[in-house]
Amino acid sequence: MFASHCAGQDVLRPIFPEDVEWKPFPAFPPGAQLAILVGNPTEAGPYMIRVRLQPDTKILPHRHPEDRVYTVISGIFYIGVGEEFDAEKLLAYPPGTAVVLPGNTPHFHWSKSGGYITQVTAIGPLGLEYVNPKDDPRHGK
């Protein structure tokens, strides 16, 4: 599957935690970072990324066109579904949990009990559209 879609993925290649390259992502607020593990999320094809949120970081309501599978790597992953941020709608998932999110589902995140890392597996290209354009860090406030 990966060999035909992802250059350099046709051989066994471990990715150790110390080799993960965390970078800011323009669509994320300060306190959130992204690391690309497999593939190229800007292109068609499979990709795997990790998202790391520092404590008390919110990603306001947004949607992705692609179906996603989140795997909680560390911390408690809080995610809520809806077009408005509502702390009462947040569900908490511990490490080891896989969360399936259908494409175009409006949702939001909050690292309210400490930082967390999730791994996202999907078929690109990755898209991210905020429900309220004013919430998008790429456009300023």
Image (cartoon, rainbow, N blue to C red):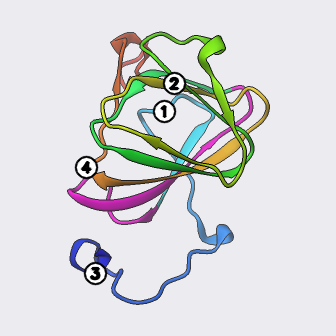
Q: Is residue 26 magenta?
A: no
- Measured from the top left, where is residue 52 in percent x and y? 61, 45
Mark 3 surroundings: few (<14), some (14-19) or many (≥20) residues within 10 A: few
Q: Is residue 134 above or below residue 119?
A: above
Q: Label 3, label 2: how many angstroms apart (C-alpha)?
A: 33 Å
Q: Would you name the residue on which mark 2 appears?
A: 108
Q: Earlier in the sequence, mark 2 or mark 1?
A: 1
Under circle 4, the secondary element is loop
Q: Residue at x 72, y 26 (%)?
A: 56
Mark 1 vs mark 3, foreground winner is: 3
Amino acid at the residue labelled 4:
Pro
Q: Label 2, label 1: how many angstroms apart (C-alpha)?
A: 12 Å
Q: For residue 6, which quarter of the picture?
A: bottom left
Amino acid at the residue labelled 1:
Phe
- Measured from the top left, where is residue 55 in percent x and y? 74, 32
Q: Would you name the residue on which mark 4 appears?
A: 125
Q: Would you name the residue on which mark 1 appears?
A: 28
- Relative to the observer, which residue lies in front, 139 or 88? 88
Mark 2 vs mark 1, foreground winner is: 2
Q: Is residue 112 above or below residue 75?
A: above
Mark 1 surroundings: few (<14), some (14-19) or many (≥20) residues within 10 A: many
Q: For residue 141, which quarter of the picture?
A: top left
